[in-house]
Amino acid sequence: MLRTHRRKSVLAAAALVATTMLLTACQGANTEDSGKSTGATTSHMAAKGASAEGGSATGAGIESKSGTVTGKWVGTVSYLAPGKYTVTDANGAEQAFFTSEDTDIEGAGKICGDADGQAATPCTEEELEAAAKKGFGATVDLKNGVAVSIIEDHADSGAGTGDGMGEGEKSGLFSGTLGYMAPGKYSLSRDGNERAFFTATDTVINGAGWICGDAETITPCTEEELEAAAKKGGIAVVVKVEDGVAVTIDEEHN
């Protein structure tokens, strides 16, 4: 009887030890799994943090805003940060953009060059940055948020006014509000000044929703569409003029 009781005690103790070892093993496994789960969560948070830390809050916003932006903008260029600028149109709408090593920067007196020159002058990034800190008018051609070209507006440099341009006295890149004067003759108005220009059969007319087409795609337009739009008024355009005749008329992307 005593032997039987001792045997039962030994078996109970052995069962208790086995149970304890099993529980310890399970806890170890749970701890390991928990560690893996925690590690994965930590890695996920780190990844999110790395994504969020791609720059300052402003920089991240600009990158997001600029990433899908393509088209031409006319307005005042301002400095934001190294390689980052904004262009603000006449209505106060501001668009951020970046520059790259391939950005074509051309000045007409404020970035660099001579306001009286017939052709724009190639400028450096350093000259662009210095001028942007003061502000200047320009046409900015963007592709996916990066400037393909930044062309300082001749009109911003104080070029002459009146119908002289239409008579072939001026050449350059000009911007303003499009107006109709007569068949084949139009005007550009900006800051209270008006200048005239002619069109020709080979003038390239590009619309972005107002002259023709839509805001998503630059569309070739006809002279008839240009005339109809000019008669309605209120359309901002960029015009490249040679000897008073428009080579290209680009509707400002809105």
Image: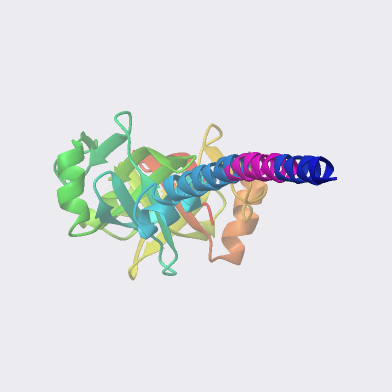
Q: Which residues are magenta?
A: 15-31
- Along the horizontal axis of the image, is 146 left or right of 35? left
Asked whether the viewer can see residue 224, the reply is: yes
Where does the image place residue 171, in percent across and percent down from the top left? 30, 41
Note whether 88 is above or below 108 in the view shown.
below
Camera-nearest residue between 251 and 33: 33
Give the residue displayed 45% in from the left and 43% down from the top.
145
Q: Is residue 110 above or below residue 193?
A: above
86 up-or-down from 151: above or below? below
Q: Residue at x 49, y 53 (%)?
A: 65
Image point 52% across, 52% down: which residue?
Answer: 253
Residue 173 place in picture, x, y as percent: 34, 44
Q: Position of residue 210 (x, y in %)?
A: 62, 56
- What secondary structure is the magenta-colored segment mainly? helix
Say whether residue 193 is magenta. Answer: no
Residue 133 at x, y = what percent? Answer: 19, 57
Q: How many marks?
A: 0
> Relative to residue 26, is residue 191 depicted above or below?
below
The quarter of the rendered structure image containing the N terminus is top right
Q: Quadrant of residue 161?
A: bottom left
Left or right side of 53 for 38:
right
Please name the colour scheme applied to the rendered image.
Answer: rainbow
In this view, the residue in front, 102 or 196, is 102
Q: Is residue 166 visible?
A: no
Residue drawn at x 67%, y 42% is 17
- The extreme top residue here reads 102
**Which quarter of the figure is the C terminus placed in?**
bottom right
